Each structure stands twice: as structure tokens, then as C-alpha cells.
Image: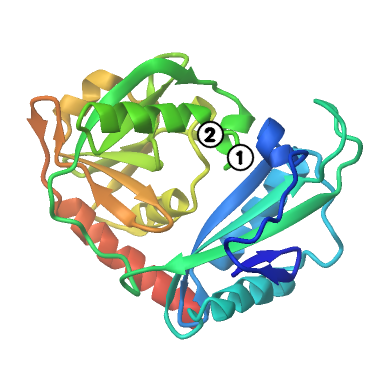
């Protein structure tokens, strides 16, 4: 069942018309959420990022778009899909309502909530081979729009196609200065000794929720030092570890980039702390 503006439709039932602006112009934003036994991981962070994104895109935020109301809508969607007592991956998409060409007739919005099954209640570390390569066909702009989870993700799609066609598990995206900023599906971190490095938002990377949580964990730690600075592609082969972060998988260790192979000791350490942080926020 799909939740469209608070009304439920079967997954095979048409909801949109050809005039949908998310379809025609990529005029929308979304959040991907992890829901476990009626609790939403890092819900406040997702909510406030969604509100900030809508304001940046000049969307009209409905009066009922409160933290509590949207939480209820998300959990109702999980329940309608028989996932209220289990594990759910939820996508919450907001698009400007149809009308107009490039310039919209108005800034009102509609939302869609989808839910599907997850396999584990907390984040787990994958041990299989995970090989990546740079994607150099197109580059990400260094601007505020690049930091948002918009429905206009054509560059990520093409990078994903490139990875699939060439036998890679993921691709690493570069900005217009040819600096490493993120992967197709999340932010990236490099480990060199006790220093853990990630690209700054100013370089055009996604303002990721798990990126933020991992940075908080590193900053609170006495064993690691955080470096939020630009990453040259040449640094990738000098790193001890290299991993991707996102809201569904948590941390995905990269095992190989070209001739370089990586360990996952620090990733495993951080994943345990990320799970502890999630549990703490769920019970607070």
C-alpha cells in the first residue's frame, strides 16, 4: 500500500498523471528512512533536513507537516504494509503539485510514502568483496542544490549504470574540481592511521544523516581525529580504509579500488557505535 497525501492506494493502482512535476522536472525531494518496530531511526534529523530542503526549493510547507503528524503517517504506512511490528525501509517523497512549465503555477505540494521489508533490525557489516571505481563522465556542481536529496539524480543513475556495466559494486563521484565527494548511494570516508576524512559540504556532497552521525561519533572519540577537507583521488590508494555511509545500510566497507585493497577494522568499530547511538535516540 502506498500513502498519497494521507490516503492509501494499492501498489499497482495509478496515482499520478502525466503532469506530475516530480516526473516532468525532477521537482521534488525525498528522505529514505529506517523503521524498526514502530521507531524511526534518527527521525528528527530526517524531518528537519526535509523541512530545510523544502524551504530551499521554495515549496509551500503545509500547516499539518509537524514532526508528530509525519511520524504518524510514516508508521501508518508501515502498518498498512504489515510492517508495523517488523523492519521497514520507507521512502518519503515530496513533489510540487502539477501545473505550469518550468515555472510552476503555485508552490503547493503532495507527498508519497512507500514501505518495503528490511532484513535486519540494526546495521550490520557486509564482509563480501565491494569494488569501486571513479565515475568521470559527468561531475557534481559545488553548490547548495547538490547537498539535497532531490528527485533529480540523473548523474547518480548514470554512475550506477556505469558500475553495473563494468562489474563494479559502486562508483565514486567527483565534483567540478575533480575532488572526491561521495558514492552513488551515500557519503564516503577515508581512514589513514587515526585520521578519518570526509568531504566538506562546500565541495558539493550530500548532507547525509549518517554522515552527520559518524562525524559526531568521531568528534566525541579519543582514538580518532576528524578531517572535513577536500579529498583528492590520489588519496584513495593511500588510505587504510574506505567506506560509504547511508541511512539504510549504515556503513558499507569498500574492499577494493583499482590495485588497492582495504581493511574494515575502523568501520566495524564505528558501526557498533552507530548502532549504540541509534538505540539511545530511540529510547530517549
Q: Is residue 263 left or right of residue 118?
A: left
Q: Which residue is mark 1?
A: 150
| Residue 222: x %, y % from top left | 27, 56
Relative to the observer, which residue lies in front, 281 or 20? 20
For this orientation, the residue located farthest to the right is 105
Q: Tell me which corner region of the image, top left, top right, bottom left or bottom right, holds residue 102.
A: top right
Residue drawn at point x = 51 percent, y = 29 percent? 154
Q: CA distance from mark 1 to mark 2?
A: 7 Å
- Residue 155's place in the image compared with 137, above or below, is below
- Residue 180 position in % (x across, y down): 36, 25
Pick the front one: 57 or 11: 11
Q: Which residue, given by chain and number where applicable, does mark 2 sit on?
A: 153
Q: Where is residue 11, by image quadrant?
A: bottom right
In depth, the one of 164 and 56 nearer the eye is: 164
Mark 2 lies on a secondary structure that is loop
Q: Residue furthest bottom?
A: 85
Image-based side of 84 in relation to 21, left or right = left
Q: Is residue 104 left or right of residue 16?
A: right
Classify mark 1: helix, strand or loop.
Answer: loop
Residue drawn at the location 67% of the way across and 77% of the way down: 72
| Quarter in which the N terminus is drawn | bottom right
Answer whether labels 1 and 2 touch (C-beta < 8 Å). yes
Q: Please, is residue 198 above or below residue 138 in the view?
A: below
Q: Residue at x 64, y 45 (%)?
A: 29
How crowded pointer 1 is (Cα within 10 Å; few <14, some 14-19, many 20+) is rated as many
Amino acid at each position: 500500500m502506498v500513502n498519497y497525501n494521507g490516503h492509501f492506494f494499492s501498489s499497482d493502482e495509478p496515482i499520478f498523471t502525466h503532469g506530475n512535476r516530480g516526473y516532468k522536472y525532477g521537482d521534488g525531494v525525498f528522505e529514505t528512512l529506517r523503521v524498526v518496530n514502530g521507531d524511526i531511526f534518527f527521525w528528527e534529523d530526517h524531518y528537519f533536513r526535509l523541512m530545510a530542503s523544502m524551504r530551499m526549493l521554495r515549496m509551500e510547507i503545509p500547516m499539518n507537516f509537524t514532526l508528530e503528524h509525519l511520524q504518524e503517517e510514516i508508521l501508518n504506512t508501515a502498518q498498512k504494509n504489515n510492517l508495523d511490528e517488523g523492519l521497514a525501509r520507507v521512502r518519503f517523497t515530496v513533489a510540487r503539485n502539477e501545473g505550469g512549465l518550468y515555472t510552476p503555477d503555485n508552490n503547493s505540494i503532495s507527498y508519497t510514502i512507500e514501505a518495503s521489508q528490511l532484513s535486519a533490525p540494526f546495521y550490520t557489516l557486509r564482509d563480501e568483496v565491494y569494488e569501486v571505481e571513479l565515475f568521470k563522465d559527468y561531475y557534481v556542481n559545488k553548490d547548495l542544490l547538490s547537498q539535497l536529496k532531490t528527485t533529480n539524480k540523473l548523474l547518480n543513475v548514470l554512475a550506477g549504470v556505469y558500475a553495473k556495466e563494468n562489474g563494479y559494486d559502486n562508483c565514486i563521484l567527483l565534483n567540478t574540481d575533480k575532488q572526491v565527494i561521495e558514492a552513488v548511494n551515500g557519503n564516503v570516508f577515508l581512514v589513514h592511521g587515526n585520521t578519518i576524512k570526509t568531504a566538506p559540504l562546500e565541495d558539493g556532497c550530500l548532507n547525509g544523516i549518517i554522515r552527520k552521525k559518524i562525524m559526531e561519533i568521531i568528534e566525541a572519540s579519543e582514538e580518532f581525529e576528524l578531517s572535513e577537507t577536500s579529498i583528492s583521488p590520489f588519496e584513495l590508494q593511500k588510505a587504510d580504509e574506505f567506506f560509504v555511509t547511508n541511512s539504510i545500510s549504515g556503513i558499507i566497507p569498500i574492499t577494493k579500488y583499482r590495485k588497492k585493497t582495504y581493511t574494515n577494522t575502523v568501520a566495524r568499530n564505528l558501526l557498533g557505535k552507530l548502532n549504540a547511538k541509534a538505540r539511545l535516540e530511540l529510547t530517549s
